[in-house]
Amino acid sequence: MEKWVCSVCGYVYNPEEGDPDNGVSPGTSFDDLPDDWVCPECGVGKDMFEKE
């Protein structure tokens, strides 16, 4: 699974870890994140992420 990086703050979304603090289970691919999911570090939307 590919990692995605926030272009604003550098947070890395790792699908193997998910984002459990925000209700995203480990193993959730970036494409399967809810449309309203935001970067847990700076709050920007998915459109501000790029493949690592």
Image (cartoon, rainbow, N blue to C red):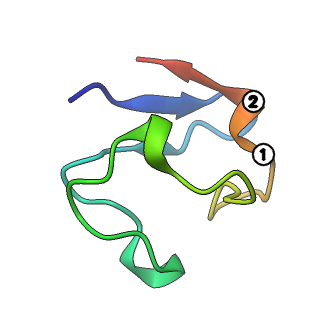
5 left or right, relative to 15: right
Q: Where is residue 41 in the image (x, y as percent from the top left)?
A: 65, 61
37 left or right, relative to 26: right
Residue type indicated by callout 1: Gly
Cβ–Cβ under 8 Å for marks 2 and 1: yes
Alpha-carbon neighbours of circle 1 within 10 Å: few (<14), some, or many (≥20)? Answer: some
**Residue pointed to by mark 1:** 45
Q: In which quarter of the image is the N terminus?
A: top left
Q: Residue furthest right?
A: 44
Element assignment for label 1: loop
Which residue lies at the image location 53% right of the left edge and 78% below the top edge? 22
Tell me which corner region of the image, top left, top right, bottom left or bottom right, holds residue 48. top right
**Residue pointed to by mark 2:** 48
Residue type indicated by callout 2: Met
Which residue lies at the image location 52% right of the left edge and 30% below the top edge? 5
Q: Where is residue 40 in the image (x, y as percent from the top left)?
A: 62, 64
Q: Nearer the viewer, residue 48 or 31?
A: 31
Which residue lies at the image location 58% right of the left edge and 36% below the top edge? 10
* 29 in relation to 35, above or below: above
Q: Which residue lies furthest to the top in this view?
A: 51
Element assignment for label 2: helix
Q: Where is residue 49 in the image (x, y as percent from the top left)?
A: 63, 29
26 left or right, relative to 21: left
- Marks 2/1: CA–CA distance: 6 Å
Tell me which corner region of the image, top left, top right, bottom left or bottom right, holds residue 18. bottom left
Tell me which corner region of the image, top left, top right, bottom left or bottom right, holds residue 8. top right
* 15 in relation to 43, above or below: above
Alpha-carbon neighbours of circle 2 within 10 Å: few (<14), some, or many (≥20)? Answer: some
